[in-house]
């Protein structure tokens, strides 16, 4: 018996070791033989259980990106890439990036959220966004993986069965790598809103059609038996395939590319400046790199691990990847004489910066002069794909839609250099506990705010909600007081507060008190595009581009709007974010108006000094000549 047990243990060890070794071997699609040709992806499709999909299957299931790619690619390694690993606390968060922004226009809430540990953002759970609801709220630009593949043990019991109906949101490989013209990423948004998580990626392909909604199905609905569908009029989620795309081996050609065209990036990474005079697409120029024929992935590269190069100056040191240093602005255009020859990568020109004092390069990033729109006297509102759903359907896209993001703001970045940023002032109702502010879920206050407006106006109180502008409400002082009083009763506390406009607001002795508080400080994140050519950079015309008294770079105002109509819109000077003094910058700028006079004065002095010098030179020569002739006599 002991021999049998021993043999069993040995065979289990050998089998486990063999399986481990097999999993460690590189997969076919993860290694290269040196050819730069594009592989032909004529492949079979597999469902989430690993079964090949045939057109006569009953039921017909959506193909799984994990199982379909798994025979050739290491999905587990890919799924830990930068776009998917936000919930992983073991990953260095890097410099702050674009947050998810939760908005509610009834309560006027706009609050930055993220799973990464960036200073100034909140965990999505703060506003009730468990993974399931997070996918519904932000699924339109969510790349899959991460919280979309949460383990069953981490799912709250009340949503366990909803996950079984909706399925997981696997890494959406097609979002980037499917370059077929028929690919429709807006379908992904639609399916995520309908809780069709397992159908979402497949729905974007050019050979599928998905209809029905998992959100209409009962918790007991089973996708295999299709039992418990829900109301009679409800349509269960189902997929149809274009049978003409399948060959006799049930294989489908998908136009998969590693060299991703920039248009695939734009769905999640586009910006629109509202007050810009050239906000129409045909009036604007692309990034200078793109107009030169480059793609986004020429700089923002990644290996099999999908750890995308973000390209900021300190990234190589922070992530301990010295080989990516040449993908920053300095690494590509300036290089490092102590390392390999980085200068001129992809034909990058070497900047001369003739006549520019070296302090500029110590205090400012390259993007300060070369990126984004030209600074103005007052910051503009910018809309982004992630915050405003640019490129998607059935969202409000007016110029005044929330959230309100100010840009460009020239502020100190993590490396202490002045860098252009986008900036969001958080706005929410909350409760103060021990000096910390805990946001209140907007749904708890919606009825309270509507009641406050109904009690204080003779007009239609729902106009601010029903009109399709996407704006937040404008509250009077009496409405504001009523809402905070109701919140105090609701939470059984006297510390009900409102955060907005860069201040913390409370009611004390019947008066509104506004004060500074860390929770009211804006969240800001640097941006680097669009990059302008040298001829359009700051300073190309004169020093007054930045140092003139009316220059937006130093003297622009940053708007800090809030729903409080009884208070004027707060504004902060740009110098407040540059850790310098507006008075000092004003004095320094004032000198530029006298510099032409000073230059003329110095030129006159130089001429006079030269004349005096020449006069005495000639006098000296005359004396030498006279002495010479005199000695001859």
Image (tube, grey):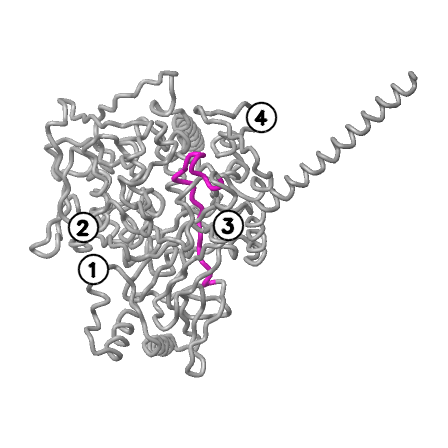
Q: Residues within 10 Å of mark 2 (few under 14, many from 20)?
A: many
Nearer to the camera, 601 or 423: 601
Whole-angstrom CA distance, mark 2 to mark 4, is: 55 Å
Q: Looking at the image, is mark 3 or mark 1 nearer the viewer?
A: 3
Residue beneath disc 3? 548
Q: Which numbered mark, 2 or 3, is in the foreground of this view?
A: 3
Residue that badge 4 annotates: 339
**Do labels 3 and 1 touch, CB within 8 Å?**
no
* Viewer-side label of 2, 1: 1
Q: Is residue 8 visible?
A: no
For this rendering, which residue is in front, 376 or 1? 376
Q: What residue is shown with label 1?
A: 468
Foreground disc of the pair 4, 1: 1
Kindly identify the residue that appears in the image at 47 percent across and 27 percent down: 349
Q: Which comes sooner in the sequence, label 2 or label 1? A: 2
Circle 3: element type: loop
Q: CA distance from mark 3 to mark 4?
A: 39 Å
Asked which secondary structure carries label 1, the reply is: loop
Q: Neighbour class for label 4 at 10 Å: few (<14), some, many (≥20)?
A: few
Q: Which residue is mark 2?
A: 214
Viewer-nearest of discs 2 and 4: 4
Q: Position of residue 631 (x, y in %)?
A: 92, 19
Q: Position of residue 436 (x, y in %)?
A: 48, 66
The quadrant where residue 4 appears: top left
Numbered circles on residues, count: 4
Q: Which region is colored magenta?
A: 519-539
- The image position of residue 567, as x and y in percent, is 39, 71
């Amino acid at each position: 018996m002991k021999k049998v047990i021993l043999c069993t243990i040995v065979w289990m060890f050998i089998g486990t070791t063999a399986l481990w070794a097999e999993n460690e071997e590189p997969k076919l699609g993860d290694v290269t033989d040196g050819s730069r040709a594009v592989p032909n992806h004529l492949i079979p499709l597999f469902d989430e259980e690993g079964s090949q999909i045939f057109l006569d299957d009953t039921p017909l299931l959506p193909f799984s990106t994990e199982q379909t790619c798994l025979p050739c690619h290491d999905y587990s390694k890919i799924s830990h890439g930068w776009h998917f690993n936000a919930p992983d606390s073991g990953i260095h968060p890097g410099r702050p990036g674009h947050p998810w922004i939760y908005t509610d226009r009834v309560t006027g809430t706009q609050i930055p959220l993220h799973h990464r540990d960036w200073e100034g953002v909140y965990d999505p759970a703060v506003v009730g966004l468990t993974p399931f609801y997070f996918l519904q709220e932000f699924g339109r630009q969510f790349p899959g993986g991460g919280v979309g593949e949460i383990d069953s043990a981490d799912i709250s019991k009340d949503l366990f069965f909803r996950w079984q109906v909706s399925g997981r949101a696997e890494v959406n490989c097609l979002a980037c790598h499917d370059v077929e013209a028929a690919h429709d990423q807006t379908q992904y948004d639609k399916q995520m809103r309908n809780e069709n998580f397992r159908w979402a990626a497949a729905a974007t392909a050019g050979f599928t059609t998905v209809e029905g909604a998992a959100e209409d199905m009962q918790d007991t609905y089973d996708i295999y038996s299709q039992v418990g569908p829900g109301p009679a009029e409800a349509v269960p989620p189902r997929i149809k395939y274009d049978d003409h795309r399948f060959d006799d081996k049930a294989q489908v050609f998908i136009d998969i590319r590693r060299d991703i065209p920039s248009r695939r990036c734009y769905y999640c990474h586009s910006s629109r400046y509202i007050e810009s005079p050239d906000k129409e697409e045909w009036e604007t120029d692309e990034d200078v790199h793109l107009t030169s024929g480059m793609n986004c992935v020429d700089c923002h590269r990644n290996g099999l691990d999908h750890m995308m190069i973000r390209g900021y100056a300190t990234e190589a040191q922070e992530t301990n990847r010295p080989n990516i240093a040449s993908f920053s602005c300095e690494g590509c255009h300036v290089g490092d004489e102590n390392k390999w020859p980085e200068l001129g990568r992809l034909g990058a020109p070497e900047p001369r910066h003739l006549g520019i004092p070296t302090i500029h390069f110590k205090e400012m990033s390259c993007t300060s002069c070369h990126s984004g729109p030209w600074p103005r006297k007052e910051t503009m509102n910018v809309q982004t794909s992630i915050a405003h759903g640019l490129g998607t359907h059935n969202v409000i896209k007016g110029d005044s839609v929330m959230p309100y993001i100010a840009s460009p703001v020239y502020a100190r970045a993590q490396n202490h250099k002045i860098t252009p940023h986008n900036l969001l002032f958080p706005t929410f109702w909350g409760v103060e506990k021990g000096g910390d502010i805990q946001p209140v879920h907007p749904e708890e206050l919606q009825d309270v705010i509507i009641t406050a407006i109904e009690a204080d106006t003779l007009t239609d109180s729902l106009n601010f909600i029903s009109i399709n502008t996407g704006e937040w409400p404008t509250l009077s002082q009496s409405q504001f007081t009523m809402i905070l009083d109701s919140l105090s009763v609701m939470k059984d506390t006297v510390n009900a507060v409102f955060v907005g406009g860069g201040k913390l607001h409370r009611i004390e002795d019947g008066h509104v008190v506004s004060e500074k508080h860390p929770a009211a400080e804006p969240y800001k994140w640097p941006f680097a595009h669009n990059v302008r050519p040298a001829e359009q950079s700051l300073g190309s015309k004169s020093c007054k581009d930045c140092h003139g008294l009316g220059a937006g770079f130093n003297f622009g105002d940053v708007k800090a709007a809030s729903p409080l109509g009884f208070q004027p819109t707060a504004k902060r000077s740009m110098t407040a974010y540059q850790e310098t003094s507006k008075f000092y910058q004003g004095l320094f700028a004032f000198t530029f108006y006298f510099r032409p006079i000073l230059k003329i004065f110095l030129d006159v002095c130089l001429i006079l000094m030269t004349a005096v010098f020449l006069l005495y030179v000639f006098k000296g020569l005359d004396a030498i000549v006279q002495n010479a002739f005199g000695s001859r006599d």
